[in-house]
Image (tube, rainbow, N blue to C red):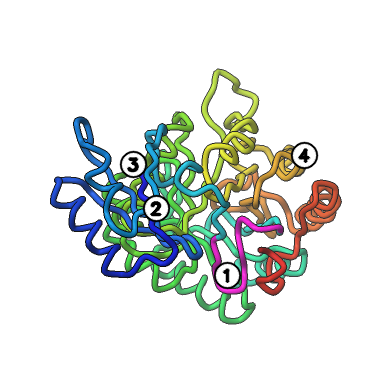
Amino acid sequence: MILEMEPNASQEDVEFVIKRAQGLGLTVHVSRQGERTVISVFGNTRGLDPTALAGLRGVRGLRQLSRPFRLASREYKPEPTLVRVGDCTVGGKAVVVMAGPCSVESYDQLRRTAEAVQEAGAAILRGGAFKPRSSPYSWQGLAERGLEILARVREETGLLVLTEVLAPEQVALVSRYADILQIGTRNMQNFPLLHAVGESGKPAVLKRGMMSTVEEWLLSAEYILSHGNEKLILCERGIRTFETYTRNTLDINAVPLLKELTHLPVIVDPSHATGKASLVPAVSLAAVAAGADGLLVEVHPDPERAASDGFQSLSLEQFRGTMEQLRLVARSVGRAMDARAPRGDHD
């Protein structure tokens, strides 16, 4: 249930509605959307007389929500959400490219990659410090040392930094070093982690679970939103199907579908979707054509010697070529690639 307050409703009016709803045993979430104040009411509303809330002073109207994912729904917020990180905006006119190695291996490796992706037009540097791997014997990352390298390269280049967080107890640590927290496919339904990221207020990327439906994915997003963090970006990274020639199957349908269902920005990870560097450029172009707000691309200065995921990582030269093609496609669908222009250019 959504209660929209009158534009001139006082803070006292808003607080009175909140207390009345809580007195009825309901959970309340307050959002200010421009000049509007919207109060979402959740819980057992069966048998509740709508006038018990809709008739209160300052309430403009009441709407029932049909989707199980409520705060993520366009029913709740019709206009697109813009997630601003530093001088970069995700969800506006610009297609935001986040690029870098699967794993932070050394300062020299990361600095070389950062300079190359920045020159090619990427706005955000990605790199894993903590690596969740299927095998306990695989490379697990440099942990906090990797975070320190990311932060150092950020200071030297001005690039924003995105990295993965694996557990609730890591959120505070990773937040000290990173600009954006990534929740990986294996942790999409790690509810304590979703709670912690929600409470952190830090911009976050939530990847789709490898075997999750769109509805399950959006309900996971709801955990973060309901804990007060509206700086959330969804990332389609492919799902497991019966196909074995690619690592996963990119659900390109999900991009325009999410644009209908949710107000949240949507990006695509073509590296994990395909698992093959040779396919990443074409899939990146398709994602932008389908309406993606950004890309999350693995790039390495020497993919054959990468500690992890070298087979799906673009070389520095391949990334430059892909960015040139992306500019053409972005322009053809009315988008831009300069994600770090003044904010007014994105709105």
Asked whether the beta carbons under mark 2 and mark 4 sit within 8 Å of each other, the answer is: no
Instruction: Identify the image quadrant of residue 246.
Output: top right
Nearer to us of marks 3 and 4 is: 3
The kind of residue on which mark 3 rests is: Met
Along the polypeptide, which appears first: circle 3 or circle 4? 3
For residue 135, say whether it is visible. Answer: no
Alpha-carbon span between mark 2 and mark 4? 48 Å
| Residue 129 forms part of the magenta stretch | no
> Dot 2: within a 10 Å radius of its alpha carbon, few (fewer than 14), some, or many (20 or more) residues?
some
Residue labelled with disc 4: 282
Which SS class for mark 4? Answer: helix
If you read the primary sequence from the N terminus, does the residue marked by circle 3 or circle 1 appear first? 3
Q: Residues under labels 3 and 1: Cα distance? A: 38 Å
The residue that label 3 is drawn on is 1
Marks 2/3 in contact by CB < 8 Å: the verdict is: no
Q: Assess whether residue 89 is covered by the magenta stretch.
A: yes
Q: Give the vertical position of 322 relative to 256 (above or below).
A: below
Quarter of the rendering occupied by the N terminus: top left
Describe residue 190's horizontal placement relative to residue 87 as left or right.
left
User: Label 2: which residue?
Assistant: 60
Q: Secondary structure at mark 3?
A: loop
Residue occupying the point 77% across, 64% down: 120
SS at mark 2 in the image: strand
- The residues colored magenta run 83-93
Residue under circle 1? 160
> Residue 311: horizontal and vertical position, in percent?
64, 42
* Mark 2 / mark 3, whichever is N-terminal: 3
Q: Earlier in the sequence, mark 1 or mark 2?
A: 2
Q: Nearer the viewer, mark 3 or mark 1?
A: 3
